[in-house]
Image (tube, rainbow, N blue to C red):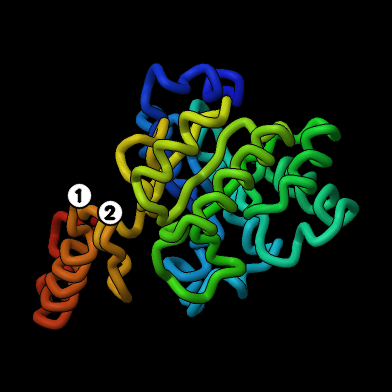
Amino acid sequence: MTTTQQIKSMKGKQKIVMLTAYDFPTARLMDDIVDIILVGDSLGMVVLGYESTTKVTMQDMISATEAVARGAKKALIVGDMPIGTYENEKEALENAKQLLKAGAHAVKIENKPEIAEFLVKKGIEVMGHIGLTPQTITSFKVQGKNEEDAKRLIELARACDKAGCFSMVLECIPLNLAKVITKSISIPTIGIGAGIHCDGQVLVTHDILGLFDAFKPKFVKRYAEIGNEMKNAFKKYAEEVGKGKFPDDNHSFH
C-alpha cells in the first residue's frame, strides 16, 4: 500500500497521480494506476446531485469512503472533511477518526493550518488544500492573481507545511504562483487548475470521463465520453426490450 511517506518522497522526483472515487467499482479500476484516491466532497455535485459541496454530510463521506476502501488495496486513500466538520479541535478529531475508521489513510481539509497541526499531533495524516476552496468560496474564479492574494496563499502554504501536512492541493491558481509555492515548501503540491509545475495532479473522475456535464472548467481535459456510451447502452436496451428482442434465447434459462 502507498504511504504518506512515499508520497512525500516523490516531491521533485516523480509526478503524483491522484483521482477521485466514491464507489467500489471505480476504486478497484483505478487502484493500481493512481498513487492517491481522493474520496472528495465533490461527490455532492457529481454523484448526489447537490448544487454545491456544502450540503455534503459526514455520513455521505463515511459511506463513500467505506465503499472505496473495499475496492482499493494499493493506493493511498484520502477522505475529504466536509464543511462544518472541523470548526474546532474536538470536532475535527472526532470526525477525522470516523473517516479513518471507514478506511481512509489520511484526511483533507481546506485552509486552517492550526487544525491540521492539531490533527497531525494526534497521529492523523493531513492533506492541505488552498486556493479555490469550494467549501468557503462561492465564486469559481482563479485565486491569487493579484500580489496581495498571491502573498497570502504563499504564507498559507508555508503554514500548512509547518503544521505537518504531508501534501497540499493547489486549486485554480496561476501556474507561476503554483511554481513559487511548490519551490517554497517541503511537501508535494498537487494541482487542479494550477499548471504543470506542481508535484502532481488531480481531477474529478466524473469530469475526465464525461459523466458530469453541468459545467466544464477550463482545466478539465476529457479523456473519454463515458456518459455518451452509457446513454447509447440505455437506448439500445430500451429498444430491444420494447421490440421484444431481449431477453433472447441465449439470455434465458431452460
| Depth order, front residue of 222/250 | 222
Q: Which mark is residue 154?
A: none
Query: Residue 181: horizontal and vertical position, in percent?
Result: 49, 38
Q: Which residue is pictured at 47% across the width and 33% down the height? A: 182
Q: Is residue 1 visible?
A: no
As drawn, 221 above or below 118: below
Query: Residue 223: horizontal and vertical position, in percent?
Result: 20, 49
Evaluate if marks 2 and 1 touch, with contact meaning CB atoms under 8 Å apart: yes
Query: Residue 221: horizontal and vertical position, in percent?
Result: 23, 53
Q: Which residue is pictured at 69% across the width and 63% down the height? A: 59
As drawn, 252 above or below 158: below
Q: Quadrant of the C terminus?
A: bottom left
Q: Quadrant of the N terminus?
A: top right
Q: Which residue is mark 1?
A: 223
| Depth order, front residue of 22/247 | 22
Quarter occupied by residue 199: top left
Few, some or many C-alpha atoms within 10 Å of disc 2 (few <14, some 14-19, many ≥20)? some
Q: CA distance from mark 2 to mark 1?
A: 5 Å
Residue type of the residue flagged with mark 2: Ile
Quarter occupied by residue 57: bottom right
Q: Which residue is mark 2?
A: 208
| Depth order, front residue of 151/47 | 151
- Kind of element beneath mark 2: helix
The answer to whether residue 97 is left or right of residue 52 is: right
Q: In this view, which residue lies farthest toward the bottom?
A: 242
Q: Which residue is pictured at 42% across the width and 42% down the height? A: 178
Q: Is residue 155 visible?
A: yes
Query: Residue 214: horizontal and vertical position, in percent?
Result: 32, 76
As drawn, 173 above or below 142: above
Q: Which residue is pictured at 61% across the width and 52% down the height? A: 80
